[in-house]
Amino acid sequence: MTIEKEPVNHKFASDNAKILQLMIHSLYSNKEIFLRELVSNAADASDKLRFKGLSNADLFEGDGELRVRVSCDKENNTVTISDNGIGMNLDEVVEHLGTIAKSGTAEFFSQLSGDQASDSQLIGQFGVGFYSAFIVADKVTVRTRRAGDDASEGVEWVSAGEGEFTTAKINKTNRGTDIILHLKEEESEFADEWRLKSIVTKYSDHISVSVEMLTPEVPAVEAVAEEKDDEGNVTTPAVEARDAIDQMGSY
């Protein structure tokens, strides 16, 4: 990734800060819902590309297999949700990620009941699901490029959820959006493949595109003697670990 120009600072609208603080500190009783929202948004981006591609096949850029990918990095304490959907240009990034709920902000506040279970269902309805990322992350990085645009038209958006964000032009060869959550230290449980898989399985079985779980390679195990079961199958720790990872695949 190459940043084409120096990042530009932006301020969130005043209501944005209120909603952010509400979601971060009190709205969700179940923090794992952040992944439901981000995967759902990624699937929506794929659906939008599928629709626009009906009249302009060039938007697929030679890759018509739409998908959402989820991965994590324990060492860096990050979770990444990627899609190869419609993506965004700079103006759309500022509009959609810089203004929470738009004209629906007041209605959003008016419908909050204080019941965390029911209030959490309003998130997707009012278009503020993206900001649930800040429930578990102290910084969020978004890298995106709109389908059909040149690679040099990629955009990076970065915010700590504290009233401002930055944007910068970047080179991004693949279309779509990558959302990188830099997890809070106390939320490191989410930088775990099995934890993420269980959440996606729980909340996202309705997703219209393939959701893939990217997993690291199993490290080689040196000098481990083979053990066999009663039927003669090898059951060394390396084989058992490899099989467990293989089963995660995509779902």
Image (cartoon, grey):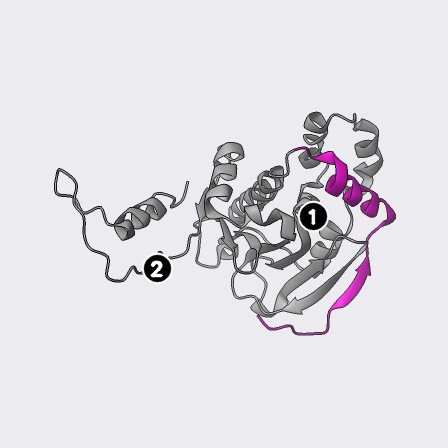
Depth order, front residue of 35/50: 35
Can you say which quadrant of the picture contains the N terminus?
bottom right
Rendered location of residue 177, percent (x, y)? 58, 55
At horizontal 56% and vertical 46% (from top left) the residue drawn is 189
At horizontal 16% and vertical 45% (from top left) the residue drawn is 228
Give the vertical position of 109 relative to 215 (above or below). above
From the image, tell me which residue sits under label 1.
134
Bin the neighbour count of mark 1 within 10 Å (Cα to Cα): few under 14, some 14-19, many 20 and up. Answer: many
Depth order, front residue of 52/19: 19
Comes first in the chain, label 2 or label 1: 1
For badge 2, the amino acid type reads: Pro
Rendered location of residue 7, percent (x, y)? 73, 69
Depth order, front residue of 94/79: 79
C-alpha span from label 2 to label 1: 33 Å
From the image, tell me which residue sits under label 2.
219
Relative to residue 33, is residue 125 drawn left or right?
right
Depth order, front residue of 33/235: 235
Give the vertical position of 100 relative to 88 (above or below). above
Q: Which corner quadrant of the image does residue 143 belong to?
A: bottom right
At horizontal 70% and vertical 67% (from top left) the residue drawn is 168
Can you say which quadrant of the picture contains the C terminus?
top left
Of marks 2 and 1, the one in the foreground = 2
SS at circle 2? loop
SS at circle 1? helix
Relative to residue 210, is residue 40 drawn left or right?
right
Rendered location of residue 118, percent (x, y)? 70, 25
In the image, the segment drawn in magenta is 1-29
